[in-house]
């Protein structure tokens, strides 16, 4: 659990396959940056492309994705002096991750985070994800 202005919080990071089904989860403290979770989520996988939003736009992450042979489909932040182009048609598929989170939020225990221990919460996330795979 991490501490923020709202109290103790956590973030759920998820990797999905091309059909929008959950593949891997990671729970991080609420104050940690999103980019820190990417290497752990992609460990052992060889994706052709990684689709992410503007929060993941960093040169360090782009170099890491080049090293593993994945194409970075990440729009540049507005503060970047020289914007890096991305494939807009491929970026439209990123909504599959958002839809997967929406399906997971139908499970009340996932949406409200009642569990006190991160291990119990992560175990339920795996149960909910397996139920999504069975549909």
Image (tube, helix red, strand yellow):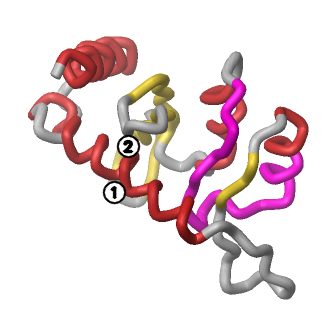
Q: Residue at x 38, y 56 (%)?
A: 95
Secondary structure of residue under mark 2: strand
* 12 to the left or right of 67: left
The image quarter in which residue 19 lies = top left
Q: Total of numbered circles in the picture?
A: 2
Position in image of residue 8 (x %, y %) = 37, 42
Q: Residue at x 38, y 13 (%)?
A: 119
In the depicted structure, whether residue 74 falls above or below residue 105: below
Quadrant, the C terminus: top left
In the depicted structure, whether residue 22 falls above or below residue 111: above
Residue 48 counted in the magenta span:
yes
Name the residue tied to disc 2.
9
Q: Which residues are magenta?
A: 46-63
Name the residue tied to disc 1.
6
Position in image of residue 69 (x %, y %) = 83, 37
Q: Nearer the viewer, residue 61 or 8?
A: 61
Position in image of residue 29 (x %, y %) = 50, 38
Instruction: Determine contact: label 1, label 2, CB under 8 Å.
Output: yes
């Amino acid at each position: 659990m991490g501490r923020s202005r709202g109290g103790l919080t956590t973030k759920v990071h998820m990797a999905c396959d091309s059909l929008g089904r959950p593949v891997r989860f990671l729970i991080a403290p609420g104050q940690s940056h999103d980019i820190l979770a990417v290497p752990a989520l992609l460990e052992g996988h060889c994706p052709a492309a990684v689709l992410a939003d503007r929060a993941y736009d960093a040169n360090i992450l782009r170099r890491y994705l080049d090293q593993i042979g994945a194409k970075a489909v990440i729009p540049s932040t507005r503060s970047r002096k020289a914007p890096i182009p991305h494939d807009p048609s491929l970026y439209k598929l990123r909504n599959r991750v958002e839809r997967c989170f929406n399906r997971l939020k139908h499970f009340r225990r996932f949406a409200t985070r009642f569990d006190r221990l991160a291990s119990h919460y992560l175990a339920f996330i795996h149960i909910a994800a397996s139920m999504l795979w069975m549909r």
